[in-house]
Image (tube, rainbow, N blue to C red):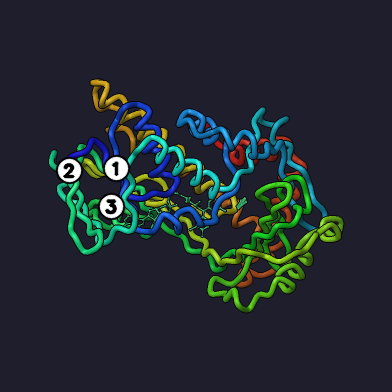
């Protein structure tokens, strides 16, 4: 088989890139390691930047998002027993939209199927070949039979543990990483959110985040050990710990109810440079990972997709390949700004037991300055709503 753009991975990066390319008349195929059911069941991000919303609209999949997504004009930062609202809208003129990644994935999969576009699920042993020459191709197995796809370009949209980045010769790639000494224990429950906007809480017992998926579905997180076992956390223990980390005015408003999803996510910052290797382009989590503190992971995948889509569109329109050649540099500039923000928010809001009382006082002072200075609040808001593409 020969195709214009072969996409590895049916997560938000691969699906959104595939949808934009299809609308521009560029043929694609997506190969995916997991089952369709697994892809659709993943619970991950919750906050979309305006740039991501605009891109989903451009891809023609914004319908349900505009009906069910919730526009948030502000976000609360809680510390020292009190919460402080950062008015995103008045400080930046921009807002964020709360709409789960699970729903984004559903919308993109539905659109791909409605357009009759091909996704091959449950593939194995994906290998990438000849990325430095014109005849790049992918091989993979499906039900024990080996297949080959020859492609003009290959988009590595297969996440942190995928085959794309690992197919690049070690001498051709540099990686930068920080692993945090904790994780996030998250639950989903069909209970009304305790607040209409997100609350990020710093507490001596650890970080907590109150988010949501709708007016009737809450998404809560608490900082935990990286090796935490979810079986050690009953709902009652989770809610009790969440209450302890929130200001009393919010803790008193917590509605509890049975969780239907509970998971632990490790936290790391990671960037691979460059993001292009001949005919192979790394996109989204295949190239970078951020701690979810700044709600940037999914949104960075969207800006990578924007840069690569525009470059491929120009290529197939007969323009020069300057945009393709500039993809890595353009994407990495926005990636590093988001990595910095996500790192700084993680350092400011989480408990670092080995760093003593002085560090804890500095964290409080940083938050105190942030919420009392218009300049500092504006800088925070600009990053949270998403820096320009
Ligand atoms: P993804 O990892 O989503 O998708 C990659 C796809 O490639 C997957 O479907 C995978 O099965 C497939 N794949 C992997 N290897 C393959 C191979 N060899 N062959 C074929 N297919 C292969 N971001 C936020 O903004 N907020 C959050 O709260 C948040 N929480 C997260 C929690 C967890 C546990 C994780 C892992 C991530 C979280 N993220 C969060 C980040 C997340 O949302 C990512 O940024 C987003 O999924 C990136 O999308 P993709 O780049 O498509 O990668
Ligand atoms: C979520 O709703 O899952 C979410 C929201 C904001 C974050 C991280 C996760 O920073």
Contact, CB < 8 Å: mark 1 with mark 2?
A: yes
Q: How far apart are labels 1 and 3 at the CA level?
A: 26 Å
The answer to whether 221 appears left or right of 314 in the picture is right
* Element under disc 3: loop
Task: Name the residue beneath numbered marker 3.
Answer: 173
- How many marks are shown on the rendered structure? 3
Residue nearest the observer in this picture, 293 or 273: 293
Residue 79 percent across, percent down from the top left:
76, 56
* Discs 3/2, front: 2
Q: Please rate how many residues cluster around mark 1, counting C-alpha atoms within 10 Å: few if below 14, some from 14 to 19, many from 20.
A: many
The answer to whether 47 appears left or right of 160 in the picture is right
Q: Please rate how many residues cluster around mark 2, counting C-alpha atoms within 10 Å: few if below 14, some from 14 to 19, many from 20.
A: few
Q: How far apart are labels 3 and 2 at the CA level?
A: 29 Å
Q: In which quarter of the view is residue 357 placed?
A: bottom right
Q: Can residue 175 be seen?
A: yes
Q: Is residue 183 above or below residue 374?
A: below
Residue at 45% over, 45% down: 12
Q: Is residue 106 above or below residue 303?
A: below
Mark 2 sits near ligand 1, with its Cβ under 8 Å away: no
The circle drawn on residue 29 is 1
The answer to whether 206 appears left or right of 152 in the picture is right
Residue nearest the observer in this picture, 108 or 83: 108
Task: Name the residue beneath numbered marker 2.
Answer: 1
Q: Earlier in the sequence, mark 3 or mark 2?
A: 2
Q: Can residue 81 be seen?
A: no
Residue at 73% over, 51% down: 216
């Amino acid at each position: 088989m020969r195709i214009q753009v072969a996409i590895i991975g049916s997560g938000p990066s691969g699906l959104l890139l595939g949808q934009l390319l299809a609308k521009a008349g560029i043929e694609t195929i997506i190969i995916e390691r997991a089952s369709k059911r697994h892809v659709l069941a993943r619970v991950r991000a919750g906050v979309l930047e305006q740039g991501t919303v605009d891109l989903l609209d451009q891809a023609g999949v914004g319908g349900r998002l505009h009906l069910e997504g919730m526009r948030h004009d502000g976000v609360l930062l809680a510390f020292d027993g009190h919460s402080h609202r950062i008015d995103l809208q008045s400080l930046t003129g921009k807002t964020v939209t709360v709409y789960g990644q699970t729903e984004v994935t559903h919308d993109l999969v539905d659109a791909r199927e409605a357009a009759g576009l091909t996704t091959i699920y449950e593939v194995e042993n994906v290998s990438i070949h000849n990325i430095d020459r014109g005849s790049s191709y992918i091989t993979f197995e499906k039900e024990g039979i080996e297949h080959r796809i020859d492609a003009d370009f290959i988009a590595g949209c297969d996440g942190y543990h995928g085959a794309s980045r690992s197919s690049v010769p070690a001498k051709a790639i540099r990686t930068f990483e920080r692993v945090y000494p904790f994780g996030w224990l998250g639950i989903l429950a069909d209970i009304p959110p305790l607040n209409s906007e997100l609350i990020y809480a710093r507490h001596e017992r650890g970080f907590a985040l109150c988010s949501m998926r709708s007016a009737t579905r809450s998404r809560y997180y608490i900082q935990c050990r990286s090796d935490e076992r979810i079986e050690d956390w009953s709902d009652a223990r989770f809610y009790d710990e969440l209450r302890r980390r929130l200001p009393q005015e919010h803790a008193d408003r917590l509605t509890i109810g049975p969780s239907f999803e509970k998971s632990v996510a490790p936290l790391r910052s990671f960037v691979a440079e460059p993001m292009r290797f001949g005919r192979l382009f790394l996109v989204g989590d295949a190239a970078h990972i951020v701690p979810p503190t700044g709600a940037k992971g999914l949104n960075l995948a969207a800006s990578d997709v924007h840069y690569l889509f525009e470059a491929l569109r120009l290529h197939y329109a007969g323009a020069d390949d300057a945009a393709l050649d500039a993809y890595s540099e353009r994407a990495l500039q926005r990636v590093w700004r988001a990595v910095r923000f996500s790192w700084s928010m993680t350092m400011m809001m989480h408990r670092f037991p080995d760093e003593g009382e002085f560090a804890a006082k500095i964290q409080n002072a940083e938050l105190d300055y942030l919420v009392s200075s218009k300049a500092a609040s504006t800088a925070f808001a600009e990053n949270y709503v998403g820096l320009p593409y």
